[in-house]
Every structure is written in structure tokens, then in C-alpha cells.
Amino acid sequence: MSELIAAEHAGRVIDGLRTIVGAPNLFAGADIEDRYRVDVMQKHHARPLAVVRPADTTQVVEIIKIAARAAVPVTPLGGRTGVVGGGVCRDGGIVLSLERMNRVLEVDDSSMTMTVEAGVPLQQAQEVAEAHGFILPLDLGARGSATIGGNIATNAGGVRVLRWGMTRDMVLGLEAVLANGAVVSSLSKSLKDNAGYHWKDLLIGSEGTLGVVTRAVLRLRPLPASTQTALLALGGFESVPALLRRLEGRFAGQLSSFELMWQDFYDYVTAAQLNTRRPPLPPGSPLYALVETLGSDPVRDLELFQEGLHEAGEAGLIEDAVIAQTARERGNLWAVRDDLTEPFKPLFPLAAFDVSLALKDMPAFVRDSRAAVLALYPSSTILYYGHAGDGNLHVAVALDRSGPDAETKVETAVYGCIRQYGGSISAEHGVGTAKRTYIGYTRSKTELALMRSIKQALDPDNIMNPGKVLPDRD
Ligand SMILES: Cc1cc2nc3c(=O)[nH]c(=O)nc-3n(C[C@H](O)[C@H](O)[C@H](O)COP(=O)(O)OP(=O)(O)OC[C@H]3O[C@@H](n4cnc5c(N)ncnc54)[C@H](O)[C@@H]3O)c2cc1C
């Protein structure tokens, strides 16, 4: 296409989009703000043709139809907190931001469900649920910005997966717009629905590559009346499986979080936070566990929590413990695990990993991956932490600044260890563009071929968020 024809073509697409959403909701050229061009990790950049902000599903349909006719790719965008570059479009593509579709449509007390538009921020949905006496159990550090649509598209996990599962486990009904403009909708409120293939499960975790999620029905639970939180110092990983099993049994299904922090992480973060808070437990233990239960009887739950931890201590599974007595103390315990923005700043540029593997293989993975990175860059800072109760580990590696290919070398080393232990390169963040080169470390050729045939069936012209999830070649 000559430059003149290309410019005319682009102009027609922009005019068409403007007609659908109105001038205030269409940005093109220099009017496109940086937040639509670069991801939260500042690693992935793009020059979109246009950013468009539809008001409802009908407008999403019209946008997709224009994009399909003009063969311009579309990238759905929620709260822009995704960390694998999935929300950054191709150069010349359309960014379809769900930010105006941000209404909670209904809370149904009798079926304990909430129906929302995809652009509702997670925290807003949590607060509305709470005002009705329910909990929306999905919770993660980016709750203030991340949207329900983005959570669904990435099948987000977070800090309560141990008890209530991933986003997938909370989505009862879904509405989405497919690449051909068809609206596929089943806003079911039932737990059971075995009438044929579960197409909604294909869209959950598809990172915008199969369609645009526009509405969802989410499952709510009764609001817990008590929260018990403790930070534990452990003598080593040997005690972790027995401790987790014991606490799950003893706390009678109330254990909602079991976060592990290795010594390197705990010592580094608590030292970096010294200006704002004192370490809740002294540094220097091999491992720390942050545990939380959510229950319905504040007095009995506290007794049960204290007894359970005391017994675990007697059994030699815990070396030291601090139990939060107030909401402020609870916040301070969680801050060691969650308040990482400032502590991590000196570590940039950072290679951040979100992997999963069997609990029993974690110590060997930590040992081997640390050795593999140190063999490449002997002075690297490497921090291990994560939602270990779910088999989910995060690894943060401060990259050696001397080599331009340091990140690729470190990724190959860490993902190589994950492959060795039969784990997954992505526990909860998705694949996006950042991990697609490595998806073959986790998925077989047959699995990748199946994924490609699903993509081909739903999006034969590769309009929906191309270049994400699947590698160009196996
Ligand atoms: C501080 C911090 C903490 C985090 N903690 C966690 C955590 O504990 N667990 C976890 O799982 N993740 C975590 N994340 C990652 C991130 O918050 C999640 O991936 C979240 O689900 C992304 O939601 P979003 O609305 O920001 O999506 P975006 O970043 O806007 O988009 C993410 C992907 O979803 C697609 N998408 C977005 N909306 C739609 C839609 N309506 N329809 C179709 N596709 C769509 C995009 O195209 C993109 O591929 C964290 C991120 C940060 C910055």
C-alpha cells in the first residue's frame, strides 16, 4: 500500500471510530497519551493508530466490525496493570480501552452474585460487594487500577487462591464480543451449567486474543467477620509442606493466604522499609511465612488461630511468630510482602518471574535457578517470594547492567530450571509478549497446535490482540 493510500485508509478508520464513540473518546496521533503507548513495566512500547473508549457492548461490536473490515488489529485494555506486555498494541493498531464501561450493574443477594461491566476496577467491585455484606474474594496488589475485564482476560490469581481459587473460579457468567463482531453471552447465575462446551473458559485467560470481555457475573461469598494474620519465621523449607497441611486442616478451611518469603527477600525488603516501619520479626531466618485466615466468629477464630500456631511451634515447624492484634498491625505485616514499589526501585532494570511448580520441588528450583543466575552474573541480587501455598513463586533478579542481552540470558536460565522441574513459566500473570518465546518450555507442540486451532477458529484474520500468547513458530 502506498503511503498516501495507507494514510487515507487510516483516516477512514479513525473517522469511522469517531462516529461510533464521539470525538471526546477517540484519540489519534499526538493526542494519544503515553499510558496507552507503554506498559506498566516500561518494557513494551507501541505507536497505536487510535485509542477508542466505547460506552457499551453495542459500540464495542461496531468498533470490532470496522477493525475487521479494515484489517486493523485491536488490543483490549483494562487498568494497564498487566506485567507481560499484553495490553500494548501493535504499531498501527487500535487500543480498545474499557475504562468507560465501569458500572456495577447488579448485586443479587439471593444468588450471591454481582454483574459488572468489564471496566469496573477490582477494588470498586470489592467495595460494592462488601456494602452488600459479601466478599468478592479475588484480591491482588494492583486492585485499585486492575479491572474485572483484565482480571478475567489474565485469569488473575492473587493472595486468596488457596481458599477460593483463581478468577476463573469466580466467573459464573460472561459476555464477550468476538473477532467477527458477534456477541456471545451467557450471564448465568448458576454454579452448575453443563450444557455443552464451556466457551467462557476459553475466553478466561485468553489475554484479549479471542475476544473482548464486556460483562461478567461474579460469584460472591458471605463477608467474613474475622481476619487473623501472622508472620512466621521458619527454620527451613523442610517444615513448609507439613506446616501448610497442618494449618489447612487445623483452621478448618479458613486458611486463605500462605505467602512465603525467602531470607534474601525478607532481609532486603525490611531493610529498605526501615524509614517507614520496623521489621515485624528480626531478619536472618531462612524463610518467613505470612498466613491469614478469614472466618465468621472473631473470638473462636482467634483462639483457634493462636492454638494452631502454638501447636505448630511445639511440633518444631515454626521458630518465631508475630500475630497481628489490630488492623494497623495486619497492614504492617502485609506491607513486607506487598509494599514493594519503593524497595524494588534500586533493583531496576529488573527481570521479574512468576512461575509455578510442585511445592516439593521449590527448594531445588530455588537452589538451581539461583546457581544458574549467579553463574552468569556472580554479583546479582536475587529475591524469592510468592503465593507458595498455590505452588506460585515470584523471582526478582536485578539485572547486570553491563550486557544488553542480560535479561534474555537470565530468563533462559530461570525458565530452563522451571522446564527441568515440570513447572509453568506463568503461574498467574499470563504470557503476553514477554513470555511467548518461552511458552514451549511449558506447553507441548500438541498443546500449542490445539491453541493455534482455537485461535484460527475464533479469529481467522488475527484481528484480536495479535502477537500475544502464541509464539510466531513452535
Ligand atoms: C503491583 C502489582 C501487583 C500485581 N499482583 C498480581 C497478583 O497478585 N496476581 C495476579 O494474577 N496479577 C497481579 N498483577 C498483574 C495484573 O494486575 C493482573 O494481570 C490484572 O488482572 C490485569 O488487569 P488490568 O485490568 O490491569 O489488565 P490490562 O493490563 O489492561 O490488560 C491485561 C491483558 O488483558 C487484556 N484485557 C484487558 N481487558 C480486557 C477485556 N475487557 N477483554 C479482553 N481482554 C482484556 C489485555 O489485552 C491484556 O492482554 C499485579 C500487577 C501489579 C502492577
Image: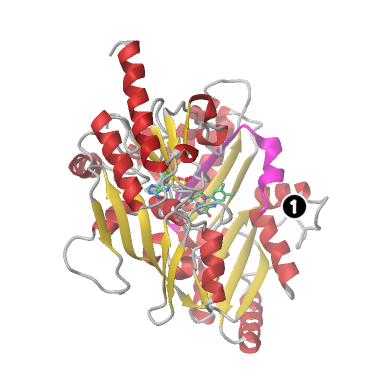
Out of 121 and 327, give the one closest to the viewer: 121
Q: Is ligand 1 closer than 8 angstroms to the Cβ of mark 1?
A: no
Identify whether 462 is placed above or below 383.
Answer: above
Task: Give the magenta part as a residue range.
Answer: 339-358
* Amino acid found under the numbered disc labelled 1: Thr
Residue 309 versus residue 18 in the image, above or below: below
Q: Quadrant of residue 192?
A: bottom left
Left or right of 462: which side holds 24? right
Query: Nearest the camera: 143 or 261?
Result: 143
Residue 150's x, y, as percent?
44, 51
The residue sitting at the right extreme is 275
Q: On the image, which quarter does residue 123 sit in?
A: bottom right
Please count the marks in the image: 1
Which of the two residues, 39 or 360, is positioned nearer the viewer here?
39
Viewed as shown, does residue 323 lie left or right of 454? Answer: right
Image point (57%, 59%), residue name: 237
Residue 397 pos. (x, y %): 59, 38
Residue 355 among those drawn in magenta:
yes
> Residue 68's spot in the image, x, y percent?
26, 35
Q: Which residue is mark 1?
A: 270
